[in-house]
Image: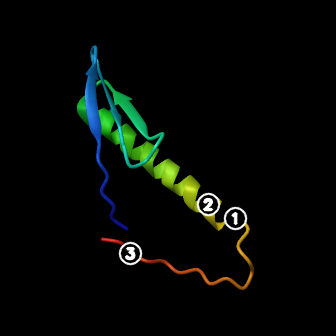
Amino acid sequence: MHNEFTAITERDGACFIAYCPEIPGANGQGDTKGECLKNLCEAIELILEDRRQDGLRGLPEDAEQEIVAVG
């Protein structure tokens, strides 16, 4: 599934920092802007996967699960 999120990047001395306002807690940093954005993407993926797992915990056995695409 393809999703797009906003990345806000700033310089912090010699490094770059980034965060995603749509995903609280998703942050990245790096020596280059590219490295920073890569780290932010990895953080977003980890947070979303954790939220998916939390959301599926405790479902009734007879509940049906399907995948829907957005966008």
Exactly how many numbered labels are in the figure? 3
Q: Earlier in the sequence, mark 1 or mark 3?
A: 1
Which numbered marker is on residue 53? 2
* Distance from the alpha carbon under mark 2 to that under mark 3: 18 Å
Q: In the image, what residue type sits under mark 1?
A: Arg
- Quadrant of residue 12 in the image? top left
Q: Position of residue 28 (x, y in %)?
A: 39, 34
70 or 38: nearer the eye? Answer: 70
Quadrant hosting residue 13? top left
Disc 3 residue type (three-letter): Ala
Residue corresponding to mark 3: 69
Secondary element at tag 1: loop
Left or right of 53 in this view: 18: left
Q: Position of residue 49 (x, y in %)?
A: 53, 56
Residue underneath mark 1:
57
Q: How far apart are the two marked residues, 2 and 1, measured between alpha carbons?
A: 6 Å
